[in-house]
Image (cartoon, rainbow, N blue to C red):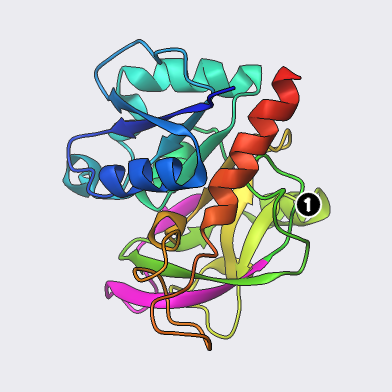
Amino acid sequence: MTVRIGVVTFPGSLDDRDAQRAVRIAGAEPVPLWHAAHDLEDVDALVLPGGFSYGDYLRAGAIAALSPIMSEVKDAAERGMPVLGICNGFQTLVEAHLLPGGLIRNAHQQFIRRDQRLRVENATTAWTSDFTEGQEIVIPLKNGDGGYICSDETLKRIDGEGLVAFRYVGVNPNGSIDDIAGVTNERGNVVGLMPHPEHATEPGFGPDTPAAMKSGVDGLGFFTSAIANVVRAAA
């Protein structure tokens, strides 16, 4: 079967084309979706890409969370469709209450860009099943509002229920509580993270590795995981 993965473009998105390319490299068909539409065009999974939707006015992702298409995204997520939020997409998912917590300005008040080491804490989600628990991967990071926050009660719950999907390793680049880089919902179909897996899917364009410069493709596992999840569900 051909798996169709929709990539939503909001005003101010800048990584939507990169996400579409990553979907294609992984072996699925990318489907561009516009924020003002109400039609998900029969996609099997969704990606909310990085960028600066609506100029990050109010709070990053706050206005995007109210976009017309988010009604359909919420309904699809509730039905179990895999949904991935990357950077600004993660911010949008927490603002839409599809994921717990929130994102605030980096602790050092500066935009950061680096290749970031992560540890996979939950390898059972729709977007992480091609990884193993405890696996360390390197994914590019670029954000100004990447500090993950939540209440003590929420932190206890997400830790206890295994809802932390990724943690920063080596350095906490933005002051996120408990080194949290990404989280999942209880069902495991909705995942959000601040680093950008779509920028680590093609040799020659990813992070440096011991084997060669720019050869890192650790981000590919996100998209192949979703494809496998959709195929399994359809079998």
Which residue occupies 49% across, 34% down?
A: 28
Which residue occupies 42% across, 16% down?
A: 71
Residue under label 1, please give it.
162
Viewed as shown, does residue 76 lie left or right of 122? left
Viewed as shown, does residue 167 lie left or right of 94? right
Q: Position of residue 164 (x, y in %)?
A: 68, 55
Which residue occupies 48% across, 75% down?
A: 116
Q: Residues within 10 Å of mark 1 (few under 14, many from 20)?
A: some
Q: Is residue 150 visible?
A: no
Q: Position of residue 114 (x, y in %)?
A: 37, 77
Q: Which residues are magenta?
A: 100-119
Check disc 1 and report its element: helix, strand or loop: loop
On screen, residue 22 above or below 203: above
Q: Position of residue 216 (x, y in %)?
A: 48, 72
Which residue occupies 47% across, 31% down?
A: 46
At label 1, which amino acid type do we have? Gly
Q: Is residue 103 visible?
A: yes
